[in-house]
Image (cartoon, grey):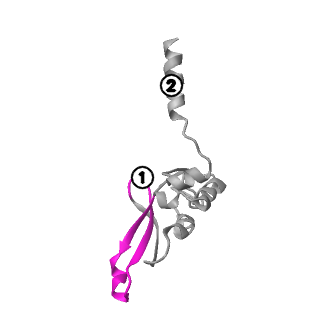
Amino acid sequence: MVVKARAWAARAAGSPGKVHLSADGRCRPLSLIITAGQRADCTQFEPVLEKIRVTRTGPGRPRKTPASVAADKVYSNRPCRAYLCRRGIRHTTREKTDSRAARGYVYLGMVTAAALVIWLHT
């Protein structure tokens, strides 16, 4: 899970910073990057995921690829989704309305539900 938060410690330097954090399902931090407050969140998506290292029990290399990622709308842009697909990571990311319209995405949920109701009645 990728979460963003404000780093108030950087406020003394003149501008607030951001903490870009990845955490597991139990909210235990896996990787952390601190950037300037003006930095865009989506630019830090790949570096945060690249820093993940989970040690294995016993011998072997640490795990670097999460099984799945749940992220904020900020990370729903094309480069972030392409990165996840390239690495074979399943993801749950809410999409912005304008990016959905730009791809020509059509939600067919009502058609599917109506077809299911018709199928159950026959």
Task: Give the crowd class for mark 1: few <14, some 14-19, many >=20 residues within 10 Å.
Answer: few
Residue identified by numbered label 1: 25
Total numbered labels? 2
Q: Residue furthest bottom?
A: 13
Residue shown at 61%/58% (left/top)?
78
Between 96 and 28, the one nearer to me in the picture: 96
Q: Is residue 58 magenta?
A: no
Element type at mark 1: loop
Residue identified by numbered label 2: 114
Task: Give the crowd class for mark 2: few <14, some 14-19, many >=20 residues within 10 Å.
Answer: few
Please identify, in this view, whether the residue under mark 2 or under mark 1 is nearer the observer.
2
Amino acid of disc 2: Ala
* Highlighted magenta segment, given as a residue range: 1-27
x and y percentages locating residue 84 in the rendered image: 60, 56
Residue shown at 38%/83% (left/top)?
15
x and y percentages locating residue 32 in the rendered image: 46, 70
Q: Is residue 19 left or right of residue 97?
A: left
- Spatial CA distance of label 2 from label 1 is 35 Å
Examine the rendered structure and indicate whether residue 62 appears above or below residue 93. Answer: below
Element type at mark 2: helix
Residue shown at 46%/78% (left/top)?
38
